[in-house]
Image: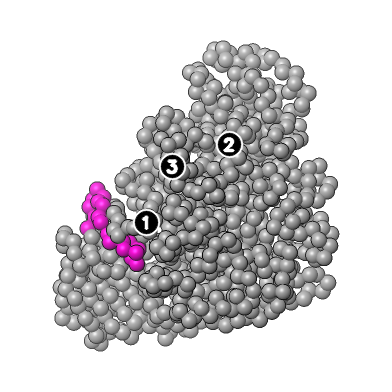
């Protein structure tokens, strides 16, 4: 089936638009992956397979305070090699399992977690380990329902809930940490002594190391790929571990791959793919729309889900990693993780709900940064706006056509000879004036800065980096590495070197700083795009750096490859934060990322193609990123490559307006496609779509607030929103926006006029545009929703209140004092609820309590036979949910932001599904103006256009408590 469908893809895509697969390794072209898969194959073939790793019970040491224990681990194969195991339980129940070689010839890279984690997690004070004859175990949790069991022989770690296995490490015996050896010792190939003890199975198996490690030393000391040689000075050091979820039929996450959300299998009978999922950050030109190939970023986080439980694991490894997925039965999952180097450092997140798992992961690696409000608006990019005048002209055309836009972007051609920071004065003679022109109506400029620095004596940034010794070194570690990128011959900033951090920060100062070079030709509202940070190296193996390059601390590039992009992103984020006092919220877009990158900004899905397949998979990739904790994601609207026809471009804007990050971008060889260039009706449709996005900025911002506090994603696929509804577990083409109750299904096919939308529950769902009421069912139901070109299928779940701002403006900062519309979508019980979060959107004053956080509630009033709609201060009601570190107990309802916003009104309240025509609508005893259109009511079972009550200009402030009483 796979072969057939990939053939079809090849036929459908013109020859020019196909990834150069030969540029990137398959598992069989990576020695350690071959070894890992071969190990798994041997285990599969051998019914009496058993892991050679075991705990020596005499070495167990339970640390004071009890929450962690350490033990010595040894392998039957190499009795002289020692490993140390450390198992600990965090305060929130997460189990961390770490294993490293002890006193080895060299050190395995052990710093991946320290980059990903926000802090060393607190250890649980309640754990009591009990050390038995064959295992160590601990029972914990509020209901004492969780148990972690570490078995001695063979070594196996099991996390159970209510006696059911949730996660099992090394249950299949594929754990293998290749110890460091010398070339000579490896060549000797000593036969292994017979093991001691009475485990006859093991005795039978262990007649040579070959049963476990294979007959040959496959690629231990050197490896070729194409014309490149990886010298592997440290020899074999790979890490294999099997992780099973015996009671979970779906796994999600491990972005970034162009595939479905519920990960298809890669091994076992009828495997969907033949290659494992690969995590090795790479600049994949014209990537496939359906593949396990590695892309630009890596988040080694996997959710496992069933109707009864959600658990997750985070495998903190920074080197290249391949992951096989199999479902031995439809309701169980086995995975196998094979990494090139590093220690074993796995976090087991016990759940038991998706929300719990997001909380647990967030406490490890941090919540997404709350973006600047404008960053959620529309971004217009192209490779390249070619001059200052071009930028001004594009801005003018948007304004002439009344199309809102907040951000104009400059790709690499602004920089003279691709020396980032240095304006090409021939085309950009007046960069600061140009930027100020863009900023005049609150807009912003984003400019690209990549990590490769042109090796030119005339380039002060390169010169300073070289003098400070903060560049990545070539193998051996003495010379600066030289490779090719946009600038020609280049060197790379080493973000692992702390010396690079302050220096990088100083570059972004807009005022002169003594003799240091600073970017005086920029402004404090110039924001940054970090591209090519995988890193991309045009003449390197797999378009990246040689693995034997050397970073700060002597670590090889192979050890840190997947973390590299995050460090550069962080450096730029820190630099922008330090640029002004008081600081403004940075905006930095990154292409490469790792676990923890959500703390530093936004990402996009890289160089996609202008095809329907890429549009569709982009939606799934953005969902997968949300599962990986990195919500601020989007794909290039229009597709980077190609010239989408107008219909496709419109649909792509429909995808974009429902993505957390919304940017149009295009390759230098494409035709101009700014939306004002289209003919009618396309131009008008896109104008309305842009306005729809702007009207919904309050919804997006409120969702981002929640993500920044709880870690719950901004986009929520069905299994997250309805974890018990099995029919939704594989759904990845429709999703909810935050907690708002908005359900969207973007259309990613040509010629559609309607679509089928899945409703997961027995609830009414209202069409956002035509107010048609659809009915779900307790066991889920599909309904047909119109989807003509101008209409993205968008439903409001009954029980939700949506806040919007509907005055068309040129940019989002101009909307600051605009009034609100509330859409009250009653559920069958005549009730609804919604939240609205607002702050200045720019500074960090929200951390000092300068914000508005309201709850709107509609309750059914039996006595008045009507509905009461009220606004209350949510900050006072959820003291435990601090906003970005502010204890709400100290929240002052009269803070200065609230005072500034006193005059901001609710100008319209629209109620869907009211039971009958009101006879009175009042606020504070005052009669209000209203209009009622009869229709289907919220509690009826039939479908049809719903009743709509519009309350006009009730003259209520968005900052204060109030109540509207609707009497019927
Ligand atoms: C981010 O930068 C800060 C300040 O330079 C540093 O302390 C921190 O370790 C960095 N974290 C990552 C993941 O790069």
Quarter holding the N terminus is top left
Task: Point out the tag, 3 or 1, that comes first from the N-terminus.
Answer: 3
In percent of width and height, residue 414 lies at 67, 69
Query: Label 2, label 3: how many angstroms apart (C-alpha)?
Result: 21 Å
In terms of depth relative to the viewer, which is nearer, 520 or 299? Answer: 520
User: Does residue 316 appear anywhere in the picture?
Assistant: no
Find out whether residue 255 is within the magenta segment. no
Query: Label 3, label 1: how many angstroms apart (C-alpha)?
Result: 18 Å
The image's mark for residue 750 is 1
**Residue in the image at 54% along x and 77% along y:** 395
- The magenta stretch is 775-793
**Residue in the image at 20% along x and 68% along y:** 946
Query: Label 2, label 1: how many angstroms apart (C-alpha)?
Result: 33 Å
Find out whether residue 791 is within the magenta segment. yes
Q: Residues within 10 Å of mark 3 (few under 14, many from 20)?
A: few
Q: Residues within 10 Å of mark 1 (few under 14, many from 20)?
A: few
Main secondary structure along the magenta-highlighted residues: loop
Q: Which residue is mark 3?
A: 8
**2 or 3: mark nearer the eye:** 3
**Residue in the image at 50% along x and 20% along y:** 45
Relative height, residue 60 to residue 441 (above, below): above
Quarter holding the C terminus is bottom left
Q: Which residue is mark 2?
A: 26
**Location of residue 410 by image quarter:** bottom right
Q: Secondary structure at mark 2?
A: loop
């Amino acid at each position: 089936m796979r072969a057939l469908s990939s053939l079809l893809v090849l036929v459908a895509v013109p020859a020019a638009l196909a990834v150069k697969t030969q540029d990137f390794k398959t598992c069989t072209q990576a020695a350690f992956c071959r070894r890992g898969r071969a190990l798994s194959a041997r285990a599969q073939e051998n019914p009496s397979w058993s892991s050679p790793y075991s705990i020596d019970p005499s070495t167990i040491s339970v640390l004071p305070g009890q929450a962690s224990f350490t033990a010595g681990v040894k392998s039957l194969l190499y009795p002289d090699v020692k490993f140390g195991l450390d198992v600990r339980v965090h305060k929130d129940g997460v189990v961390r399992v770490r294993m490293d070689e002890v006193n080895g010839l060299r050190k395995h890279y052990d710093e991946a977690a320290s980059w990903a984690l926000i802090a060393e997690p607190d250890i649980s004070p309640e754990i009591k380990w009990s050390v038995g004859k064959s295992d160590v175990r601990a029972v914990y949790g509020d209901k004492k329902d969780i148990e972690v069991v570490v078995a001695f022989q063979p070594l196996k770690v099991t996390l159970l809930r209510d006696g059911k296995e949730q996660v099992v490490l090394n249950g299949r015996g594929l754990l293998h940490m290749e110890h460091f050896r010398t070339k000579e010792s490896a060549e000797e190939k000593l036969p292994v002594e017979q093991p001691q003890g009475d485990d006859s199975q093991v005795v039978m198996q262990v007649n040579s190391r070959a049963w476990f490690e294979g007959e040959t030393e496959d690629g231990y000391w050197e490896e070729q790929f194409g014309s490149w040689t990886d010298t592997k000075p440290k020899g074999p050091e790979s890490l294999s571990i099997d992780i099973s979820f015996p009671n979970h039929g779906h796994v999600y996450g491990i972005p970034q791959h162009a595939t479905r959300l519920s990960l298809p299998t890669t091994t076992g009978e009828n495997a969907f793919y033949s290659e494992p999922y690969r995590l090795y950050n790479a600049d994949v030109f014209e990537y496939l729309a359906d593949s396990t190939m590695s892309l630009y970023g890596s988040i080694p986080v996997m959710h496992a889900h069933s109707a009864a439980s959600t658990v997750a694991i985070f495998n903190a490894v920074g080197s290249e990693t391949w992951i096989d997925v199999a479902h031995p039965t439809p309701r169980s999952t086995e995975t196998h993780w094979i990494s090139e180097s590093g220690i074993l450092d796995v976090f087991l997140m016990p759940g038991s709900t998706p929300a719990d798992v997001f909380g647990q992961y967030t406490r490890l690696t941090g919540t997404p940064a709350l973006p600047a409000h404008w960053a959620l608006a529309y971004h217009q990019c192209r490779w390249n706006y070619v001059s200052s005048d071009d930028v001004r002209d594009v801005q003018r055309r948007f304004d002439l056509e009344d199309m809102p836009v907040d951000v104009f972007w400059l790709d690499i051609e602004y920089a003279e000879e691709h020396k980032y920071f240095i304006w090409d004065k021939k085309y950009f003679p007046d960069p600061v004036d140009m930027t100020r022109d863009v900023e005049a109506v609150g807009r912003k400029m984003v400019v690209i800065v990549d990590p490769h620095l042109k090796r030119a004596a005339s380039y002060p940034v390169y010169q300073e980096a070289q003098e400070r010794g903060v560049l990545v070194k070539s193998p051996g570690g003495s010379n600066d590495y030289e490779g090719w990128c946009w600038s020609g011959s280049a060197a790379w900033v080493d973000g692992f070197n702390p010396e690079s951090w302050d220096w990088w920060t100083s570059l972004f100062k807009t005022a002169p700083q003594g003799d240091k070079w600073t970017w005086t030709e920029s402004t404090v509202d110039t924001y940054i795009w970090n591209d090519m940070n995988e890193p991309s190296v045009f003449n390197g193996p797999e378009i990246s750096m040689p693995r034997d390059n050397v970073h700060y601390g002597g670590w090889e590039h192979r050890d840190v490859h997947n973390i590299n992009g995050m460090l550069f992103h962080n450096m730029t984020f820190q630099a922008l934060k330090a640029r002004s006092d008081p600081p403004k919220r940075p905006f930095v877009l990154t292409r490469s990322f790792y676990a923890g990158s959500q703390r530093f900004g936004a990402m996009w899905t890289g160089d996609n193609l202008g095809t329907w397949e890429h549009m569709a998979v982009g939606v799934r990739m953005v969902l997968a990123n949300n599962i990986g904790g990195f919500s601020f994601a989007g794909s290039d609207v229009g597709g980077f490559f190609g010239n989408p026809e107008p219909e496709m471009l419109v649909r792509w804007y429909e995808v974009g307006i429902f993505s957390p990050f919304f940017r149009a971008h295009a390759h230098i060889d494409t035709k101009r496609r700014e939306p004002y260039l289209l003919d009618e009706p396309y131009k008008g449709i896109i104008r309305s779509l842009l306005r729809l996005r702007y009207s919904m900025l309050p919804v997006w911002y409120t969702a981002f607030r929640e993500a920044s506090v709880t870690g719950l994603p901004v986009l929520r696929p069905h299994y997250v929103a309805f974890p018990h509804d099995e029919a939704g577990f594989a759904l990845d083409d429709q999703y909810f926006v935050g907690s708002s109750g908005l359900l969207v299904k973007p259309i990613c096919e040509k010629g559609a006029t309607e679509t089928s939308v899945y409703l997961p529950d027995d609830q009414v769902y209202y069409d956002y545009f035509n107010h048609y009421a659809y009915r779900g069912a307790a066991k889920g139901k599909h309904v047909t929703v119109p989807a003509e070109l101008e209409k993205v299928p968008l439903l409001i779940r009954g029980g939700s209140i949506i806040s919007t701002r509907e005055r068309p403006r040129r940019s989002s900062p101009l909307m600051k004092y605009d009034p609100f519309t509330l859409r009250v979508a009653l559920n069958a019980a005549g009730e609804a609820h919604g939240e609205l979060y607002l702050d200045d959107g720019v500074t960090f004053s929200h951390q000092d309590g300068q914000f508005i956080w309201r709850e709107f509630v509609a309750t059914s009033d039996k006595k008045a036979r009507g509905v009461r709609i009220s606004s209350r201060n949510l900050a006072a009601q959820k003291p435990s949910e601090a906003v970005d570190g502010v204890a709400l107990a100290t929240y002052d309802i009269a803070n200065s932001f609230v005072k500034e916003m006193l005059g901001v009104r609710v100008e319209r309240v629209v109620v869907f599904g009211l039971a009958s025509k009101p006879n009175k609508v009042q606020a504070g005893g005052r009669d209000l103006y209203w209009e009622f259109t009869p229709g289907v009511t919220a509690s009826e079972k039939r479908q049809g256009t719903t009743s709509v009550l519009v309350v006009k200009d009730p003259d209520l402030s968005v900052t204060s408590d109030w109540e509207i009483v609707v009497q019927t």
